[in-house]
Image (cartoon, rainbow, N blue to C red):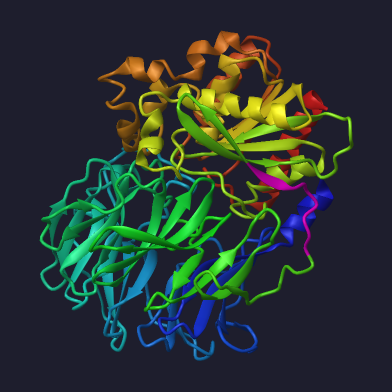
Amino acid sequence: MQRLTEQLGKTVLYGDVALSPDGTHVAWVQSTAATTSKQTYIRETFGNAPTKLVKLPVTGERTDFDLAWSPDSKTLAFFSSVGERDQRQLWTVKGDASDAKKITKLNGYAARPRWSHDGKQIAFLYIEGAGGGGPLMAAPNTTGVIDTAIHNQRTAVLDVASGQLRQVSPENLHIYDYDWSPDDKKFVATAAPGPGDNNWWIAKIYRIDIAKGNATSIYKPSLQVAVPRWSPDGKAIAFIEGLMSDEGFHGGDLFTISASGADVQNRTNGRKSSVTSLFWLTSDRILLTEIVGGGGAISELTLADKSVRTIWRGAEALHAFGNFPDFAVSKDGKFGAAEHSTFETPPGIWVGPIGEWRQLTNNNSALSATWGKAESLEWANEGFNIQGWLLSPAKIESGKKYPMVVLIHGGPSSAATPDWPAGFGMSRAIIAALSSRGYYVLMPNPRGSYGQGEEFTRANVKDFGRGDLRDVLAGVDAAIKKYPIDPARLGVTGWSYGGYMTMWTVTQTNRFHAAVAGAGIANWQSYYGQNLIGQWMIPFFGASVYDDPAVYEKSSPIHFIKNVKTPTLVIVGERDAECPASQSYEFWHALKTLDVPTKLIVYPGEGHMFIEPKHQADRLEQTVAWFDKYLK
């Protein structure tokens, strides 16, 4: 196990991919899976010029993020900080990685820089005098009078020549995403009154007058909205709307609306995919990234007839905005840059005409998979066509049967897609670890997942744990029927919604003989009053717990706790804002009271996403040891 952890820890990871508008230079943030340092690199996309590290006049372990090229492709802007508590500042550097300059003196959280079209200004999201970062991060300690101060994230505009900074969006709105109008006089934004972490699920689309600083609501969605973008002629706005369970993990249909807020149109209605990002290339052409099934696609939408042409389709899913962006295109949309990664292919930067990529980096060329082969598995259940990924053991002997662990993804509005199992805080390493130790690993995409259109994504509304569990169990049956899997040695695990599904599963069936529930939810009724993002629950449950407690109770594992016989390990971060540690404690406490084999591990200082490498490694080792104990 230690050897695998060390191998995966050496994996070079790439993020925040940014392609210059003319397509001649690509920049990215580079790190390794075992460290927290992240530095910016730049390379020409043509020829064999070397990759250049952007050097800054600072000492200590730095963290770079949010890269943005100027319109003339000559300058790269990015945020950087040194050490855990250092104030992030905005820097610029030339395209050849020279002449680094710090151009701000900020005090507070800042993110997502975007240049104006004339290249004279840079806008970014800013919370002056306060922290931010979203609910994935560890929640701050709260004492004293609660909810007396709301620090809204606003849009700030920096004049590059003079260094003058001004905040231009209203104080009473928290801005989540935004885009410059073509004339640089307005923003379109998704926004809601604070607190920001909680209210993303009720955000509307606003038009903001930069000179006057006022905001006009132009669209109130029925669900969630993301990635608002102006048309090149300034007459319309495109955005994604759909049922989304997490800010930054977007998926839904593509909509357009006039700049005044009229003529709302769903441009992908009924399409069996989930749009994740968009680029408005010309007045009639929009480039889309999509999740399709358990993979991804890049497609071009022609607005005149709503026709969609798929340019590229692959096993992995690419996206350009939100959390962990790994794709970018040139201004004309013909040239792309992507971080490619699958179960078989370690991460690397690839560039070229979309779909005709060539590999640009080879930092991971010495790495090879020590786990088994991945296959797409499909099955039908209750009128749905379900897809999942099945990873086989590293070695399979004829005539022998193997244990299988079902890994249920978070969300639920998300999807299991192929990726080298070293990123996202090493959370994916469990896949490699189990496979290398002789397990099959099933990663299903049941109803509620992205990849098959909005009807499929909404199919678990007011039905958490029920229909989606039946889909998962049908997948288990399909895998056992096709592969040498021992039905007496099944395990189940997951994180976040997957942690909830693990808790739910062991209360509904005794088919599984070991379980590891990560950041789960034991009791939807008590959870409603404990978490810091309660607004996300309304679209899924239809009402608050105070208005319809029954719909929350019927999906709560704690309500069926006396059915549990499965040995269950429970893991959570101490300061998880999304799935509070109290939920894990409640589940563990119940199992312990009922003499079900269990163990609870609370990792100090961690939030919903683990940051500390030693905690990531220990979580992996504890998980595998639990399955080995009960399934080997």
Q: Main secondary structure of the magenta part?
A: loop
x and y percentages locating residue 31 in the rendered image = 63, 66
Residue 42, relative to residue 140: is it above or below? below
Which image quarter is the N terminus in? top right
- Which of these two is toward me, 558 or 63? 558
In the rendered structure, the answer to whether residue 46 lies left or right of residue 218 reads: right
In the rendered structure, the answer to whether residue 516 lies left or right of residue 194 reads: right
Residue 374 among those drawn in magenta: yes
In the rendered structure, the answer to whether residue 457 lies left or right of residue 347 reads: left
Residue 504 is drawn in which quadrant?
A: top right
Q: Is residue 155 visible?
A: no
Q: Is residue 423 visible?
A: yes
x and y percentages locating residue 489 in the rendered image = 76, 23
Residue, x 60% and y 41% (percent of image)? Answer: 604
Residue 457 among those drawn in magenta: no
- Which of these two is toward me, 140 or 573? 573
x and y percentages locating residue 287 in the rendered image = 37, 65
In the rendered structure, the answer to whether residue 487 lies left or right of residue 28 reads: right
Residue 191, relative to residue 56: is it above or below? above
Residue 193, relative to residue 509: is it above or below? below
Residue, x 68% and y 21% (percent of image)? Answer: 512
x and y percentages locating residue 155 in the rendered image = 27, 65
- Specify start and end residues of the magenta stretch as a single range: 367-376
- Which of these two is toward me, 354 or 344? 354
Which image quarter is the C terminus in? top right
- Which of these two is toward me, 625 or 224? 224
Residue, x 67% and y 40% (percent of image)? Answer: 390
Number of callouts in the render? 0
